[in-house]
Amino acid sequence: MADLTLTAKNPTALKVDALVVGTCSTSDGVAVVADQLPDALVRQIETLAPRLGVTGSPDEVRRLPAGDGVAADVVVLAGLGERAPDGTFSREVLRSAAGAATRELAGTDTVAVALPAVDEDELAAVVEGALLGAYSYTRYRTGKDTKAAVGSIQVVTSFARSARAKAAVARGEVLAAAVHGTRDLVNDAPNELYPAAFADAARAAVKTLGVKGVKVTVLDDKQLAAGGYGGLVGVGQGSSRGPRLVKLVYAPAKATQKVAIVGKGITFDTGGISLKPPASMPTMKSDMAGAAAVLHTVLAAARLGLPVAVTGYLCLAENMPGGNAQRPADVVTIRGGKTVEVTNTDAEGRLVMADGLVAAVEDGHDIVLDIATLTGAQMVALGNRTSGVMGTDAVRDEVKAAADVAGEAFWPMPMPAELKAGLKSTVADMVNSAPSRWGGMLFAAHFLKEFVGDTPWAHLDIAGPSYNEGSSFGYTPAGGTGVGVRTMLAFLEGRSER
């Protein structure tokens, strides 16, 4: 990850490869938003902007020769869009602009970022964005033209010596490391990241990051069978590489809250016997994004020393159509005794999550969150950039508030009572797949709710936003996005203040 420091020096004096400043759209064209740049350079940029195609719109990043009076090699214009009515820019706009700039500057050694942050909260957004954008996944690349992420970043601010600003940098580094770690796992090839390998990666992450106070335990396929984890066993039985349940416990001595977070970890999803179309397969390595987010959220909470007890459950399996794969019409018994008729083997995520949710409730928590790439219906309803959140009203709204603070797009969704009737089975306690294609995301939430009892709970469906199949934007790269980590960490921080 890029090394980030704060500086109060005049940005024109910084000898860096690139100096990032803001531009915004105005009724007259484009305005440069940067203090201490030479007036002549500002006038030149604003005059030439229309002819250079510079608009100041969000996500626009353009490089120009620095010219006289600027020590940097190039000046980089990062679009901020239009100012708010009060003349400012939102924290998410600043976060996105900083991230777009560092993302576009991949391969650059030294970068200075001079965006308009009027207080430490806005500065924190710039720091986060700059670090989130400085990401590159190169594990399998061998070519010399591969661009690594930005090497070092200086953020220009008058708050450089402020204790709050320094704390913002420390938190931003932990947050970005968690998001990057999640992205890495999602981007890893499924032939290398299977359930047992994921479990090993969880153990290694605790050691590599030097996280103290996190205990990791792993149940293998034999232990899962003996423990009655029928969802994990059933989904994983078609693969030669058995399922795992990884439990990570962070329990600080003075914790006043106990929170469980459960993550779906299907390391590859073929759909099983209910086979997916070939075109839908390549991105199914990302079906473990929820578990990856849970792992790194727990580690981030521990690194920040939050006074909240957090237990993460990684529900890991590979859904393959092998000779021993579960069949449509099979009945499985979830941990705790409830039975499920499998009407669709491609609705497997909710089966492994059911086991994890029961385990979380058995262990006793004040609140349970789960996060999963659960349904294609999420994308139908909300698109590829907005996640859905359902559950107990108060917890659902608390997650939405945390997402707003973190800068992630989540939208509260209902759980209409009439959809619950679709759970009925003629041979078991319930079915795993909706009888109708309508409201699939909401039906899945009803299924999960059957396994949390009266425990306050929220379900985060990140199916679309977890993996970016299109072009990069803002601080979001192509491939794994790391979505959910920032929201869950903000949620835990909010709980720690109660």
Image (cartoon, grey):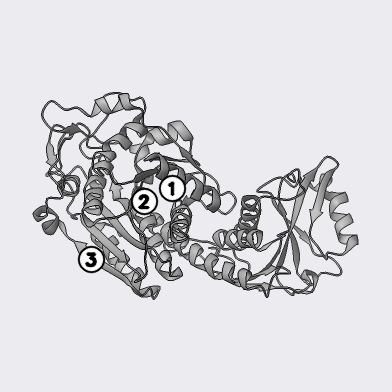
Disc 1 or disc 2, which is closer to the eye? 2
Write the residue at 82% across / 50% down: 31
Q: Amino acid at mark 2?
A: Gly
Q: Secondary structure at mark 3?
A: strand
Distance (Cα) linking label 3 and label 1? 26 Å
**Image quarter of residue 124:** bottom right
Residue position for label 1: 466
Of pointers 3 and 1, the one earlier in the residue sequence: 3
Write the residue at 22% across / 40% down: 272
Asked if one can make out residue 58 in the rendered structure from this viewpoint, the answer is yes
Of pointers 2 and 3, the one earlier in the residue sequence: 3
Q: Amino acid at mark 3?
A: Thr
Asked if one can make out residue 407 in the rendered structure from this viewpoint, the answer is no
Q: Nearer the viewer, residue 399 or 11?
A: 399
Write the residue at 30% across / 35% down: 446
Pointers 3 and 1 in contact (CB under 8 A)? no
Q: Is residue 421 above or below residue 133?
A: above
Distance (Cα) linking label 1 and label 2? 8 Å
Q: Nearer the viewer, residue 259 or 338?
A: 259
Q: Label 2: few (<14), some or many (≥20) within 10 Å?
A: many
Q: Is residue 314 above or below residue 386?
A: below
**Image quarter of residue 55:** top right
Q: Secondary structure at mark 2?
A: helix
Q: Position of residue 468 (x, y in %)?
A: 48, 46
Pointers 1 and 2 in contact (CB under 8 A)? yes
Q: Which mark is residue 217?
A: 3
Q: Which mark is residue 290?
A: 2
